[in-house]
Image (cartoon, grey):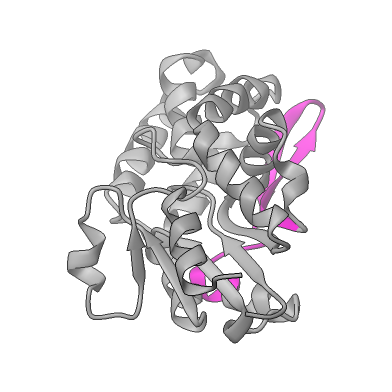
Amino acid sequence: MENRNIIWDYDGTILPFTPYDSEQFLLDYLLYKENKQLSFIKRIVAKAALYADNKQIIGPSFKKYYRWVMKGVNTYILEEVNNALAIAIPDSYIDTLSSFAAKGFKMYVISCGTVELCVNPLKIKKADTLFKEIIANQFIYKNNKIDGLILNVASGEEKVKIAEKLNLKPESTIVVGDGYTDIPLLEWSSYPFMVDPEKKRRKRFGDRNYTFIESLPQLIDIFDKRFPQ
């Protein structure tokens, strides 16, 4: 396998569900630990959006409510949340990422999540420099408050477009993901891996050419067997 690349998803892949993804975790934190940041109406909307997104019944519409709820929130909240998210990333996952970087892989994170919730936990774990690029949606700030959200990665289909803009080729790119927004990239890649810790997704996607893993460290043995040095 020449010109080796890996595209990683973030939520549910590098960051295991806690039981929330990073954006859901942020909303939960605001609802139950910093609820003075949100008005009564925003708390209602945040609870509804959190529930619907966690059950995967709201789709891309979640971002509209997430952006509205987050507008006006003080930025110090992000530091507190990022510290908690960093703790949730297992050291064995960081070791796995480091191992692939040492093998010469060029690595990327392409996520439909929020870049601040991706980069900063990885930076705390001293793993952000393992990646050539970390691409996700991005907050806008004004007067130390969140003022909006730029949708750099609005959908799973957008992930494929980004990979192609990076001049990555499916025949030389491993893709590791876990959810519905990863399906377009998994279908695009010649080496798709789906993270499935509860062994539920393999029932749904078992007819596809995915390799199912329960955790990231399994990738090392699988790779070494398929591509012995």
Q: Which residues are magenta?
A: 133-159
Instruction: Give coordinates of residue 9: x percent, y percent.
Output: 53, 57
Q: Nearer the viewer, residue 47 or 117?
A: 117
Instruction: Give coordinates of residue 125: x percent, y percent.
Output: 66, 31
- Tell which residue pokes out farthest to the left in this image: 203
Can the viewer see residue 114? no
Q: Nearer the viewer, residue 159 or 170?
A: 170
| Residue 158 part of the magenta-drawn span | yes
Q: Nearer the viewer, residue 27 or 226?
A: 226
Picture quadrant where residue 148 is located: top right
Residue drawn at x 52%, y 14% is: 36
- Tell which residue pokes out farthest to the right in this image: 143
- Tell which residue pokes out farthest to the front in this image: 229
Instruction: Give coordinates of residue 141: x percent, y percent.
Output: 77, 37
Image quadrant occupied by the N terminus: bottom right
Q: How many marks?
A: 0
63 to 90, vertically: above or below: below
Can the viewer see residue 178? yes
Residue drawn at x 64%, y 79% is: 161
Horizontal side of residue 10 vs 44, given as left or right? right
31 to 68, vertically: above or below: above
Residue drawn at x 63%, y 36% is: 71
Image quadrant occupied by the C terminus: bottom right
